[in-house]
Amino acid sequence: MDGKWDELGMNVAYEEAKKGYEEGGVPIGGCLIDNVTGEILGRGHNMRFQKGSATLHGEISTLENCGRLPGKVYKGCTLYTTLSPCDMCTGAIIMYGIPRCVIGENVNFKSPGEEYLKQRGREVVITDDSRCKEIMKKFIDERPSDWFEDIGE
């Protein structure tokens, strides 16, 4: 697939991650972009600490902020996320039929979800974005117990 919206998508996802960090949350952000028009259908960031939620990871928050969309809409989109998606978020990508996932980084956390997405016919692109790596490492160093809680360890 064409990646002409990838720079926009990663910039928005990073802005969301930074916003989450500034709110005292986990710095993982995302957005969903229409592959044809470049329209941002939704954007969000991890809200587990801010909302006392067990499930509001960055990707889930992004999908939540899209509101209800017809199923066919997701099939023409790319989900951008600053960090390798966990099993829950991987499942949401598969469930909605999102064909492409662009990931800012997978150094601080690499989910088996990346390979599972590929096995299920999804395109996975790793951008190795230094901003995403730096903000995530900073959070993990500052709040290791909160990080382990976020990934279920």
Image (spheres, grey):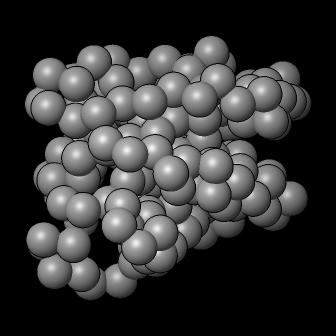
Q: Quadrant of the N terminus?
A: top left
Direction from residue 119 to residue 142 in the image, left or right: right
Residue drawn at the location 78% of the way across and 28% of the way down: 130
Quadrant of the rendered image containing residue 15: bottom right
Can you say whether 133 is above or below 150 in the image? above
Q: Nearer the viewer, residue 136 or 37?
A: 37
Residue drawn at the location 21% of the way across and 72% of the way down: 73
Residue drawn at the location 51% of the way across and 61% of the way down: 31
Can you say whether 15 is above or below 104 in the image? below
Residue 124 drawn at (x, y percent): 36, 30
Q: Nearer the viewer, residue 70 or 26?
A: 70
Direction from residue 152 to residue 139 in the image, left or right: right
Can you say whether 63 is above or below 112 in the image? below
Direction from residue 41 to residue 150 in the image, left or right: right
Q: Does residue 149 show up?
A: no
Residue drawn at the location 22% of the way across and 24% of the way down: 118
- Please tell me how many numbered marks the rendered image carries: 0
Direction from residue 88 to residue 31 in the image, left or right: right
Residue 48 drawn at (x, y percent): 57, 56
Q: Nearer the viewer, residue 72 or 90?
A: 72
Residue 67 drawn at (x, y percent): 35, 83
Can you say whether 38 is above or below 101 in the image? below
Q: Does residue 106 show up?
A: yes
Q: Nearer the viewer, residue 110 or 41?
A: 41
Residue 71 drawn at (x, y percent): 13, 72
